[in-house]
Amino acid sequence: MNEIFKMFRIDPEESDRINKAENDPHHHDYEELLIGKYGQLEHFIDFKSQLIDAPFVSFIAQGKLHRVKPLIKDGKCDIWTIRFKREFIAETVFQLYSSYHDKANICLKADSCFERLDSICQIIYDEYLQPNADLSIIRQLLSSLFTIIESDRKKLNLNYDESKKIQSLTFKNFLRLLEENYKEAKDVNFYAEKLFMSTRNLNIICQDILHQSVSEIIEIRKLTEAKNLLITTDKTIAEIGYELGFNEKTYFTHAFKKKTGITPSEYRKEMIKIIS
């Protein structure tokens, strides 16, 4: 996906088109949020399939192997589809991983709480369709949308087995520590010691949940913030690199290009073109 943000609705006609097309399990280079008002969703994720009825919320993290089949039920299908790059709401997206890594699909009640989600989606969509859509407005509304979803998710009091609870809690604590320290030069040992565990066990948990090592997650968090700063500020490349713990501009540029395939300057130019 070239855009930093994209949104559309799946209606019965689009559902039929998707299900007739080739639709094998695949990975995304973006985050995806599905909010179903009517219909069903057949979702294959984490190597298992689940059929859920609307109303529902489904969050698919970047890199997750999955496949969705939106289905018509009682003649209806209405599913909001929101796609966005990780850096679009960098301060929120890593928190989402801790909440949804083992529970991608959440069924909700068709009540006033869900109506709020639908209303916010409509407001976001209306702004997105404007000739000169204001991405800062969309960003704020999207963050609010996730806040409401998280609140509703907690009210459901979802239960997990004890091993999943422990693993999930450790992962959440790691991400909390990461948010507090990612701008500094902290390595895997620092996080493992803070969590009173070995680097091996912390890596096992991260590999199991995100299929990435602790070092990779730390680097991705830094580069996600770098992309965010390149888009939203006028700071120089050197200033951004220094802010994220890279003492040398050349080292920051090398790390950025190695991960993204382009330099920070090239990325900024490309995003300015897309946004404008």
Image (cartoon, rainbow, N blue to C red):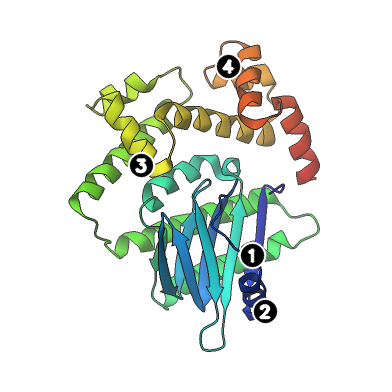
Give residue 13's mark.
2
Within 10 Å of disc 4 (Cα), the crowding (few <14, some 14-19, many 20+) is some
Q: Quadrant of the C terminus?
A: top right
Q: Earlier in the sequence, mark 4 or mark 2?
A: 2
Within 10 Å of disc 1 (Cα), the crowding (few <14, some 14-19, many 20+) is few
Determine whether label 2 and label 1 are within 8 Å by CB. Answer: no
Secondary element at image label 1: loop
From mark 2 to mark 1, how far is it between C-alphas?
16 Å
From the viewer's perspective, tell me whether residue 245 is left or right of residue 226: left
Q: Which residue is mark 4?
A: 242
Please report the residue visible at 50 percent of the width from the left and 67 percent of the height from the top. Answer: 117
Residue 144: x and y in percent read: 50, 55
Which amino acid, mark 4?
Tyr
Q: Which residue is mark 3?
A: 208
Within 10 Å of disc 3 (Cα), the crowding (few <14, some 14-19, many 20+) is few
From mark 4 to mark 2, how far is it between C-alphas?
50 Å
From mark 4 to mark 3, how far is it between C-alphas?
32 Å
Does 27 appear above or below 190? below
Please report the residue visible at 54 percent of the width from the left and 69 percent of the height from the top. Answer: 69
Within 10 Å of disc 2 (Cα), the crowding (few <14, some 14-19, many 20+) is few
Residue 85: x and y in percent read: 61, 45
Which quarter of the picture shows residue 46?
bottom left
Which amino acid, mark 2?
Glu
Please report the residue visible at 54 percent of the width from the left and 57 percent of the height from the top. Answer: 25
Secondary element at image label 4: helix
Determine whether label 1 and label 3 are within 8 Å by CB. Answer: no
From mark 1 to mark 3, how far is it between C-alphas?
29 Å
Which amino acid, mark 3?
Asp
Determine whether label 4 and label 3 are within 8 Å by CB. Answer: no
Determine whether label 4 and label 2 are within 8 Å by CB. Answer: no
Marks 1, 3: nearer the viewer = 1
